[in-house]
Amino acid sequence: MKNVPNRVILPESELPRQWYNVQADMPERHDPYINPGTGKPATSEDFYPIFAEELARQEFSTERFIDIPDEVRELYKTYRPSPLHRAYRLEKALDTPARIYYKYEGGNTSGSHKLNSALPQVYYNKRQGITRLTTETGAGQWGTALAMAARFFGLDLTVFMVKISSMQKPYRKAIMETFGADVAASPSDRTASGRKILEQDPECLGSLGVAISEAVEMAVTTPGSRYVLGSVLNQVLLHQSVIGLEAKLQLEMVDEYPDLVIGCSGGGSNMGGLMAPFMRDRLTGARKPYFIAVEPAACPSFTRGKYAYDFCDTAKVTPLARMYTLGSGFMPSSIHAGGLRYHGMSPILSKLYHDGFLDEARAEKQNDVFAAAKLFAGEEGILPAPESSHAIKAAIDEALRCKQSGEARTILFGLSGHGHFDMGAYISYNEGSITDYIPTDEELQKGFDTLPKVE
């Protein structure tokens, strides 16, 4: 094995020219989306009123590789290829024989991997002649990335930010507004769905499902407007595959291949992007890496959810998707990992998990996650986002298992963003005021009761 540097840098010339679509190699595609109006399987044309037409086509595509537009690739070059780090100091602190690598996506102003999909989504809308976009955001990474992309391509943008996140992360809102976005705390009085929820619960702190409802409603009722989504959808996992494609090339540069691939999972964009080329190896029988998805115990879609058809939003206006879900009516607690507070999971990841290709899902408590984040920050010098810290927790656990067994396994995890705008969370942890919340079976049942009956 080569002497591995602390950072493995991929030359700009090796920036991928195509995205990889994992659907092309899945033995079975995920179950079809259902049009809520007709009750029948949805087509790409059914998505045209909501999404740009090219994005709707990508949602249903089984083409293995899709070209990255030159305009998007040039903007990628402003922050990509992103570095792959060897966590030497963390390995030493853990006294483990494991080799730990992490792909770091925080090296752009948005602070996370979300820009990888924001740029192409805005590009395709601009090319179609769309002038205004709407979206939702949880912790704010997606809203920040989309505000940047909208500014680059000259489109107006309205962001519905989950109310609790807008309270916890005011600086995220400031960045979005700096790039010209209009930001509303959700639920808001700007939409019928928002007003209805506020009538029922004036103190509602919101959820991603609620914010999606508001954004979709505004998009379909505003001329020249379309909706864009930062996770869950097939098109988003396609764009995020750039993460894994780069990581695989970087590991090849140092004669490595991961035994374990670990990612945090809220809707699935980060995990789906990191694992994509390695999952292709698994699906085609070339290699057999082990995949671990990590979610918050407060919002346990994979570990305690049902594999069922559900709406992607709280107002039940979006197409139905079969996924691991807690029910569109589930209201998660106000944990600090706001980007992981979604009630469902990507249909692609859900199908892969259901069929045994995505091997394991874990749910972690807040205090354990922040303890891992603090250890990582102290050793590696990067302050991780609370979302990414779920993956760090699992990577540390696996490295300690290697210490016990003496097995020198190669671990790859995704560090999907930095925690510079999450200082309130770190203050709370350092003061000992963060609480662990795990919903009871009775609380989860309230969400399951909102699941639609699909034949």
Image (cartoon, rainbow, N blue to C red):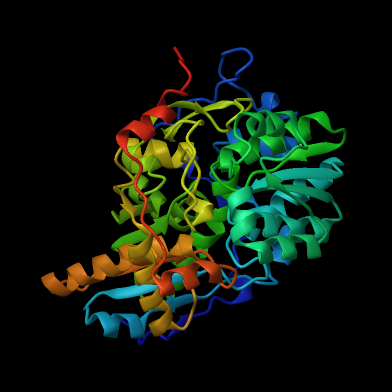
Task: Choose between 25 and 344: the one closer to the eye.
Answer: 344
Task: Choose between 355 and 87: the one closer to the eye.
Answer: 87
Is residue 254 visible in the rendered image? The answer is no
Task: Choose between 282 and 304: the one closer to the eye.
Answer: 304
Q: On the rendered structure, is 149 left or right of 130?
A: left
Q: Quadrant of residue 205?
A: top right
Q: Position of residue 189 (x, y in %)?
A: 75, 37
Residue at the spot 22% in from the left edge and 82% down from the top edge: 95
Q: Is residue 28 above or below residue 104?
A: above
Task: Report the quarter where the C terminus lies.
Answer: top left
Residue found at the far front of this picture: 202
Is residue 302 visible in the rendered image? The answer is yes
Q: On the rendered structure, is 166 left or right of 340?
A: right
The image shows a total of numbered marks equal to: 0
Q: Position of residue 64 (x, y in %)?
A: 53, 44
Q: Quadrant of residue 114?
A: bottom right
Residue found at the far left of this picture: 405
Residue at the spot 12% in from the left edge and 70% down from the top edge: 405
Q: Position of residue 447 (x, y in %)?
A: 44, 30
Q: Is residue 349 above or below residue 418?
A: above
Q: Position of residue 286 (x, y in %)?
A: 32, 53
Task: Choose between 70 and 225: the one closer to the eye.
Answer: 225
Residue at the spot 32% in from the left edge and 38% down from the top edge: 440
Q: Quadrant of residue 325?
A: top left
